[in-house]
Amino acid sequence: MQFKKIILYVWSIRHQFTKYFIVGISGLFLDMSTLIFFKEFFGFNATISVILNQVLMLTYNFLLNKYWSFKNKALPHKQLTRYLILAGFNYLFSVGVMYLFNHLYHMDYRLVRIVTIATMVLWNFFLYKYWVYGEIKNPKS
């Protein structure tokens, strides 16, 4: 019985997840483009490049997910605070992983970034849905 509820729930959020996924894929291309641009064109090291590109990505992801993926029109002060807390965690995670695997273990910075993004996607959808944008169900009359 529990498995059926899980399947029904997953099916019920498929459109919203698809939009989140589209924002994510487009964000991945933008993220990787700006990362490579900062690294290759300006010559910054990978850690500095990921620090800079995250400012752009945080803005892009917040606005598209708020207004398109989760169709949230509420005033953003509480959401922005929660988003920035999550973004801060994701930011530290991104920079830390880049430093560890690129700087210390000399892994390719592009591969490190892709794996980092894929890992964060796993927790971000549910944190956006239930904590950042906090969907509120209307009580049945």
Image (tube, grey):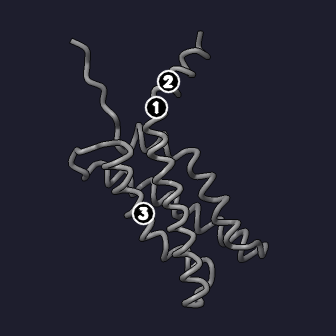
For discs 1 and 3, the disc positioned in front in the rendered view: 1
Task: Mark 2 and mark 3 in contact? Answer it, CB < 8 Å.
Answer: no
Return the residue found at the far top. 1
**Residue where numbered disc 3 is placed:** 58
Marks 2/3: CA–CA distance: 28 Å
Closer to us: 88 or 59: 59
Task: Mark 1 and mark 2 in contact? Answer it, CB < 8 Å.
Answer: yes
Decide: is 100 above or below 72: below
Q: Is mark 1 on a helix, strand or loop?
A: loop
Q: Residue at x 21, y 48 (%)?
A: 75
**Residue where numbered disc 1 is placed:** 13
- Point out the image quarter for the N terminus: top right
Decide: is 59 above or below 137: below
Give the amino acid at mark 3.
Leu
Q: Which residue is drawn at 70% across and 69% down?
A: 100
Assess disc 1: are there few (<14), some (14-19) or many (≥20) residues with their C-alpha within 10 Å of its C-alpha.
few
Marks 1/3: CA–CA distance: 23 Å
**Residue 106, how many percent across, how many down?**
77, 76
Q: What element carries label 2?
A: helix
Q: Which residue is drawn at 30% across and 26% down?
A: 137
For discs 2 and 3, the disc positioned in front in the rendered view: 2
Instruction: Answer left or right for 81 relative to 108.
Output: left
Q: What element carries label 3?
A: helix
**Residue where numbered disc 2 is placed:** 9
